[in-house]
Amino acid sequence: MESLTLSARIVVRPIREFRSPLINPLRLKRPSKDLSFMAATSIPQAKASIGLHFNNTCPSKEVLEGWRNADAVCFDVDSTVCLDEGIDELAEFCGAGQAVAEWTSRAMSGSVPFEEALAARLSIFNPSLSTVREFLEKRPPRISPGIDQLIKKLKAKGTNVYLVSGGFHQMIQPVALHLGIPVQNIFANKLLFGSSGEFVGFDKSEPTSRSGGKAVAVQNIREVHKYKAVVMIGDGQTDLEGRKPGGADLFICYAGVQLREAVATKADWLVFDFQDLIKFLE
């Protein structure tokens, strides 16, 4: 079995949105249409107004201190750093988008164990190695507005940044490279393929492949590096689980893409725009 490992060089050129062609190191044939690594436009004000129904959109003094003093920040990727759910996009590319998206919704709400949902989704469309390569060339990730600036601010403060995701390492590497995050700071699942490139499963030894796994990943990060303060940022139930003893001290729910009420109500801080996090770093 083999897993696909990728790197990418991102070149940003400003037009209406931030766009850049994704140059694939696998040297696949470049499609005729323009490919873009895009940052979305600003979040509609209507979405932010939903926050009026929650009592955790204004951070407490303790939460602000925890945010400003964090040694490390762990970001979810799907619907947080990126606008899309990677597995849903891959499934849509393979013609199974709706069926897989329904499972994703259940997994993110916590109504089914994550490992069950992951296995079920992959079994619906069984992505081959060649399909994943083609997808990565034709469907570059779309990053959330403000995430570039936030990560630059964190790094300038000396805060370490990690990507902790239930998505796939192979699809997250280009995102990490674009944001200047070391590949070794990615904690995610790995797709496995046979000798002919056929899909044979996923690496079940990865903590992020099961419910509670993000908490384990964050705990490992903290223990290895002896961090005193760690923050987890994400949108789903598995991200909320990262706030456990020995794991993250704070959980910040980012609802700029998806608002999951059951998760948002339990967050230490609910934000709809990364600019809020940037503002309170200063």
Image (cartoon, rainbow, N blue to C red):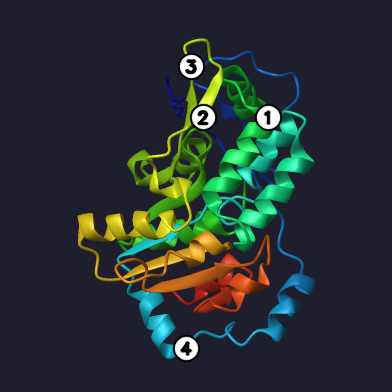
Residues at marks 2 and 4 touching, judged by CB atoms closer than 8 Å: no
Residue sitting at 58 percent across and 57 percent down?
80
**In the rendered structure, which amino acid carries the disc numbered 2?**
Gly
Asked if one can make out residue 16 in the rendered structure from this viewpoint, the answer is no
Residue 59 image offset from top left, x and y in percent: 51, 84
The quarter of the picture where residue 113 lies is: bottom right
Query: Residue tagged by mark 4?
Result: 60
Query: Residue tagged by mark 3?
Result: 194
Considering only order in the chain, which callout, 4 or 2, is on the residue closer to the N terminus?
A: 4
The kind of secondary structure element at disc 3 is loop
Residue extending furthest top? 196
- Residue 113 numbered mark, or none: none
**In the rendered structure, which amino acid carries the disc numbered 1?**
Phe
The kind of secondary structure element at disc 2 is strand
In front: label 4 or label 3: 3
The kind of secondary structure element at disc 4 is loop
Residue 22 image offset from top left, x and y in percent: 58, 30
The quarter of the picture where residue 180 lies is: top left
Gap in angstroms between the C-alphas marked 1 and 2: 11 Å
10 Å neighbourhood of mark 2: few (<14), some, or many (≥20)? some
Query: Residue tagged by mark 2?
Result: 201
Gap in angstroms between the C-alphas marked 2 and 4: 44 Å
Q: Quadrant of the N terminus?
A: top left
Above or below: residue 249 compared with residue 39: below
Residue sitting at 36 percent across and 54 percent down?
217
In front: label 4 or label 1: 1
Q: Is residue 189 left or right of residue 54?
A: left
Above or below: residue 116 compared with residue 237: above
- Residue 125 numbered mark, or none: 1
**In the rendered structure, which amino acid carries the disc numbered 3?**
Gly
